[in-house]
């Protein structure tokens, strides 16, 4: 897609540090290197975010993730863990609107990557939880 920075990276119009490439995906170093080896995996097909994937593209993209994750782990033996992050839409911190999966190797609790999941369980009753799950369940059925 025109004016998409990641399409330009795929087409080598903009340089990048490649990690892996095949007919479906391109993986390259994220310029920010939040931690050493921070990698982006992107589909070669331009899709904006997770809401645009079909099952084939999703399975093709995600099937590549484990081998790239293992490669990062093996390249940096001091790697003690890995966060996989996928931001969708501006509110959720997406800043490049060509879908991408962040692979962020972790070296220590102080390695500059942070992610908090606050515990709000006390705000939800059993009935609330049931009704939230049902609302989603009904919509998932429409996508089978
Ligand atoms: P988002 O915030 O959308 O989840 O992540 C976009 C990521 O793309 C950011 O982590 C940012 O560092 C990375 N990025 C943006 N422009 C470029 C670029 O030109 N080259 C590379 N390698 N990474 C980029
Ligand atoms: Zn694109």
Image: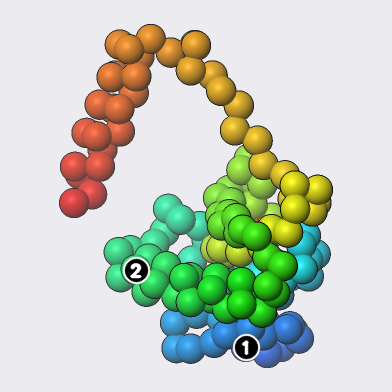
**Along the viewing direction, whichever of 103 and 53 lies nearer the viewer:** 103
**Along the viewing direction, whichever of 123 and 72 lies nearer the viewer:** 72
Q: Nearer the viewer, mark 1 or mark 2?
A: 2
**Left or right for 72, reference 64:** right
Q: Secondary structure at mark 2?
A: helix
**Left or right for 108, reference 70:** right
Position in image of residue 30 (x %, y %): 72, 69
For ligand 2, tell me if the residue under mark 1 lies within 8 Å.
no
Position in image of residue 88 (x %, y %): 55, 50
Q: Which mark is residue 59?
A: 2
Is residue 73 shown above or below 125?
Answer: below
Q: Residue at x 33, y 63 (%)?
A: 54
Q: Secondary structure at mark 1?
A: loop
Identify the residue position indicated by label 1 in the image.
11
Quarter of the view holding residue 96: bottom right
Cα gap from disc 1 to disc 2, whole angstroms = 23 Å
Q: Which mark is residue 56?
A: none
Position in image of residue 61 (x %, y %): 43, 71
Earlier sequence position, callout 1 versus callout 2: 1
Q: Residue at x 59, y 33 (%)?
A: 117
Q: Residue at x 67, y 42 (%)?
A: 115
Labels 1 and 2 touching (C-beta < 8 A): no
**Along the viewing direction, whichever of 53 and 71 lies nearer the viewer:** 71
**Along the viewing direction, whichever of 73 and 46 lies nearer the viewer:** 73
């Amino acid at each position: 897609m025109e004016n998409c920075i990641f399409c330009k990276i795929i087409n080598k119009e903009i340089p990048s540090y490649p990690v892996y490439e095949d007919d479906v995906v391109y993986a390259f170093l994220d310029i920010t290197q939040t931690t050493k080896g921070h990698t982006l995996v992107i589909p070669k097909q331009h899709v904006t975010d997770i809401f645009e994937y079909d099952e084939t593209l999703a399975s093709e993209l995600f099937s590549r993730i484990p081998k790239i994750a293992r490669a990062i782990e093996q390249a940096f033996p001091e790697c003690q863990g890995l966060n996989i992050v996928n931001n969708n839409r501006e509110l959720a911190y997406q800043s490049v609107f060509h879908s991408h999966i962040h692979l962020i190797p972790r070296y220590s609790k102080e390695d500059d990557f942070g992610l908090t999941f606050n515990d709000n369980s006390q705000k939800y009753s059993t009935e609330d939880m049931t009704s939230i799950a049902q609302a989603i369940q009904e919509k998932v059925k429409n996508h089978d």
